[in-house]
Amino acid sequence: MRMFPKFRWHSRAVHEERDSEQENKAYPRTEGSPCESLTVWRKSLVISCEGFTVIDSDGNLVYRVDNYIEHPEEVVLMDGAGKSVLTMRRRRKLGLGDCWLVFDGEVDNGSAESPILCVRKHVNILQGNTNNVLAYVYRGTSDKRHAFSVEGSYAHRMCKVLDESKEVVAEIKRKEANSKGVSFGIDVFQLIVQPGFDAGFAMALVLLLDQMFC
């Protein structure tokens, strides 16, 4: 069984236009390697379906989500060919917050496969969330110390994923148009992934933030 942080997928990353657009122990940054710039479109290419479409800088479809609904029990991230990359399942438990388990590939309903990650929505009971923490990522369901944190505002599509040393490994940004006066709105945005960090997992975090904060 592959357990985080050793899992890596050799999938490509995503973008809609052809413009040109760390260190963590598990994902060392390669000197001189460019970051991956993906364009995320909150729309399915399948007629009559809600979903996400993710395109790389060469205009290739690399990730997709179809039949997307609000507050589901399960969300499946697929590659461009429709093969399951990650399965995310909502964890039902007593207490505050939204918690999701992340599995590698496709998972059957009766499967006893262990999750590779656990993502928990940050619940700010007291006032004063000065870091604007949105969620924490854990290597195990019982871990007390998080491996990654997500900060910022998903509603404004301005988020950063940070590792334990506070290095930024991925970012969600508003997409800027090349032409003046053209606005993409919040349904088309950029996902910037630093070298060494998995683009599939970064996109999975986008889906979970969408569930937690949309």
Image (cartoon, helix red, strand yellow):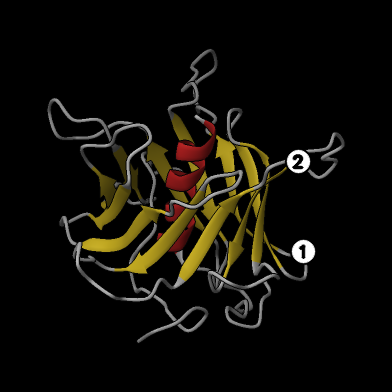
Closer to the camera: disc 1 or disc 2?
2
Q: Earlier in the sequence, mark 1 or mark 2?
A: 2
Examine the rendering and report whether any part of residue 21 can be seen.
Answer: no
Residue 35 falls left or right of residue 107:
right
Residue 58 in the image, given as x and y percentages of width and height: 33, 51
Q: Residues within 10 Å of mark 2 (few under 14, many from 20)?
A: some
66 w.r.t. 183: above or below: below
The answer to whether marks 1 and 2 mark residues whose Cβ atoms lie closer than 8 Å is no
Q: Note whether residue 101 is visible.
A: yes
Q: Residue furthest top?
A: 181
Q: Which mark is residue 19?
A: none
**Tag 1, which secondary structure?**
loop
Identity of the amino acid at label 1?
Answer: Lys
Which image quarter holds the N terminus?
bottom left
**Residue assigned mark 2:** 132
- 64 sits to left or right of 97: left
Q: Is residue 58 above or below residue 70?
A: below
Tell me residue 140's x, y (percent): 54, 73
Q: Secondary structure at mark 2?
A: loop
Answer left or right for 22 relative to 165: left
Q: Position of residue 86 (x, y in %)?
A: 33, 62
Please give the name of the residue rendered at 58% of the width and 72% of the height, measured from the top-left corner.
Answer: 142
| Residue at image point 25% right, 58% down | 79
Whether residue 81 is situated above or below residue 95 in the rendered picture: below
Residue on which the image places disc 1: 166
**Amino acid on which the number 2 mark rests in the picture:** Asn
Toward the viewer: 191 or 30? Answer: 191
